[in-house]
Image: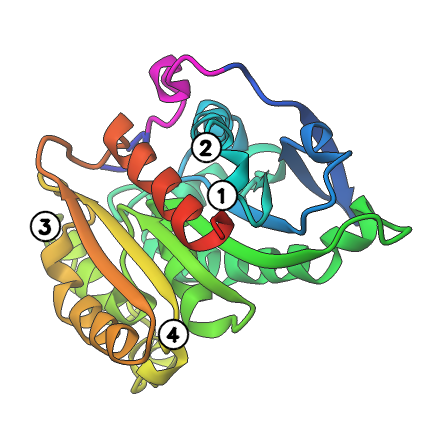
Amino acid sequence: MSNVIHRTDEPSLTFGHDESSVTELSIVGLHLTVYGLKEIEKSDRPLAVLVAAHGRTNSQKNMITFSHGILGKVNSKDDRERKRDLIIVTLDQRNHGGRITDRKANLSYDENPRHLIDMAAKVSGGAQDVQLIIDFLAAYLFPLGQKTIDEWIITGISLGGHVAWRLLREEPRIKIGIPIIGLPFESFPKYMRPRAEAMGIPFVPPTYPPSLIPFLEDDVDHHKYKGKKILTIHGGHDKLVPLDKGQADIDAVLKVVNESGGKGEIWVDENTGHAVSKEMVEKTAEWVWEYGLRK
């Protein structure tokens, strides 16, 4: 379990589309990769930004084919129906890729007794990194005001899916999200407990420090999700982050979403475990197009 790999870099995920342009950018040391920027330079449409967050033990390099595939799908749509252009931004999660300082901190309970603490910190820190991007990306890319970013969309895989869920709850500027094989932050103890107990590790201090209980278990204001467009994607055979550990929380969220003029759906790929399939990428692209780009 500690060496889990979330494959998002299979060549098939591009669906045979040409690769989009790639632009490197650093926001005060936070290294970003921007996909599709050159293609929209001459367009006068406003811009949507999809931030795509990778999974645990991966890096933003594992999001290359995922990003090209999403852009290929949405850019093949009829421009007459397009309200916004799209770029995709990836980054290394905390303690991943070029930011890694402690490899043990990315492992599970059997090799890292602080797994719960480290995971909670990575989810919280990952959300903060995306908020920094929202605050400053336009200033770095368009210092003369050449483009207007008027829609922020989040997607992410596994750890990145958890980050996506946290942002959908805590960041009002993100109104569209597609978490993939991830669960809401309010579900965190519900899937971290069985992971520990399966290894014979009691879910008590120091594994679960008392100081984190209010942070992880306080009552959630589900009205923060009102009006949002959320597609949550899961693998039917996912044993690491099983849907059933977050089902009740997701149902509560989507009830508020759908009753407040938003749109919320659960989609399960019954042929997939804790991994990313072509069908998942297709569903993500369709959601981005329908709610983020289409007139």
Q: Residues within 10 Å of mark 3 (few under 14, many from 20)?
A: few
Q: x and y percent of residue 242 in the render? A: 14, 50
Q: Which residue is mark 2?
A: 77
Is 28 positioned to the left or the right of 234 in the image?
right
The amino acid marked with disc number 4 is: Gly
Which secondary structure type mostly characterizes the magenta part of the structure?
A: loop
Q: Which residue is mark 4?
A: 227
Distance between the alpha carbons at the discs numbered 3 and 2? 46 Å
Q: x and y percent of residue 250 in the render? A: 21, 67
Which mark is first along the chain, 3 or 1?
Answer: 1
Query: Quarter of the image holding residue 148?
Result: bottom right
Residues shaded magenta: 7-17
At mark 1, the secondary structure is: helix
Q: Residues within 10 Å of mark 4 (few under 14, many from 20)?
A: some
Asked if residue 10 lies in the magenta stretch, the reply is yes
Callout 1–callout 3 Cβ contact below 8 Å: no
Q: Which residue is mark 1?
A: 81
Is 68 positioned to the left or the right of 284 in the image?
right
The amino acid marked with disc number 2 is: Lys
| Up/down of 151 relative to 270, above or below | below
Given this view, does label 4 or label 1 mark the residue nearer the observer?
1
